[in-house]
Image (spheres, grey):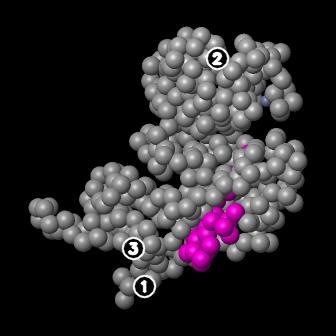
Amino acid sequence: MKGSAVYQLTARDIRRRNRFAVLQAVYAAAGHISRQEIAEATGLSFATVGNMIAELLDVGVLAELGYDAASVGRPRARLAVNPARGMLVGIDLAETAIHFDLFDLTMSVLRSVEIPVAPNACRPQDVVPLIVRGIHELTGDDAAEVLGVGLSVPGPVEPEGGVSVFSPYWDWHDIPLKSLLQQHLTHPLYLDNPLKTSTVAELWFGAGRDVDDLIVLTLRAGVGIGVVVDGVLYRGVTNSAGEWGHTTVVLDGRECRCGRKGCVEAYVSTPGIVATLRERDPHSALLDPDDATTLTAIAEAATRGDVVARTVIETTGRYLGVAVANLVNLFNPRTMVFGDLVANLLGDPLLTATRRVAAEHAMAAPFDAVTLQLSTLPHNPASLGAATLALEGFLADRERFGSVAARRASRTTT
Ligand SMILES: [Zn+2]
């Protein structure tokens, strides 16, 4: 019995993974694609691709746009994601603001809302009503069209129960965020932290489409990684894999907000980089109360040749380069993607400094095999990835897809 149950689970997992792969190929085509091209892009058999597409057409996720008249032989149906099938909500709960995006099913942003979080009002009982209000403002009359809501929450998250295990900014411990929100919401709800959601976004829409062994670095007020092994996001035993930001890069170094000293995050996060600037020049004209504004000023000053700004980027690249070299040695990835606020603002100069230092500290063979690159995702990766979790939840809905499979089976046997 046990073996049979395991087999069934495995078959369902494979089916779901194939469904994801087919839809990812359609997204990658960024327009329309034929069954033949999907089979080529995914490496799946034509029969499997046909089955997956039939399911996705049946539930309305895909639509046939007509036939490709130019092809030789049988005309090829052109397939595309059906934007009108439904909407998805992606939410990035960050330390000073909550960002809400409403996506259609092509993952184009339809609308966005941002709600600030006051520093003195960040208890769960303060934040939950803000999230509920934001979702209502965002979805408005379209609420019935929403297939699911994804929420990115900083710190370790227990995704099944939706418990925020620990949020370092607000000193949250074991907050049952999902059940608190479900008292006010009817949509299916998916929670994870920005390290995981950003990596899911890269898997579906970014660098992860082309490689199976990937590390996604999320560099914002907090930093960490998502590790993709053989095409699958590695979560660890308690879903806390990727807390690289709290590995040590300097013994007895700067205090980190996790309570320890010398963590990677204390040097390469937005506040860490601002601290480096402040150490160099406590009265720098580049300093602003808003860390993102300070980083923008550093980037602009560096392009003008400002020595302090360039030193700050070089220093950040030293710490980041050592920490990246450790990852290269540990994981031997094909690609490492640098994403989020710090990567967006400091971009190529930081990547160049990081690459140079990583080359000095990493072992030669794995370093030669890895490509370090900036993320090309157009949106906030945390909110896009959160919405993608909701999409995955919709696509993994056993009742919905199970009934399609059952109907198809009964059609073919009668
Ligand atoms: Zn730390």
Relative to 304, 42 lies left or right:
left
Under mark 1, the amino acid is Ser
Q: Position of residue 205 (x, y in %)?
A: 46, 49
Q: Earlier in the sequence, mark 3 or mark 1?
A: 3
Q: Is residue 146 magenta?
A: yes
Against 185, is 306 above or below?
Answer: above
The C terminus - image quarter: bottom left
Q: Which mark is residue 312?
A: 2
Q: Which mark is residue 57?
A: 3
| Residue indicated by mark 1 | 410
Using the rendered view, name the quadrant where residue 263 is placed.
top right
Give the quadrant of ligand 1. top right
Callouts 3 and 1 close, C-beta under 8 Å: no
Give the label, 3 or 1, closer to the camera: 3
Q: Position of residue 133 (x, y in %)?
A: 73, 66
Front residue of 52/145: it is 145
Front residue of 362/391: it is 391
Give the label, 1 or 2, closer to the camera: 2
- For numbered disc 1, what is the local secondary structure? helix
Under mark 3, the amino acid is Leu
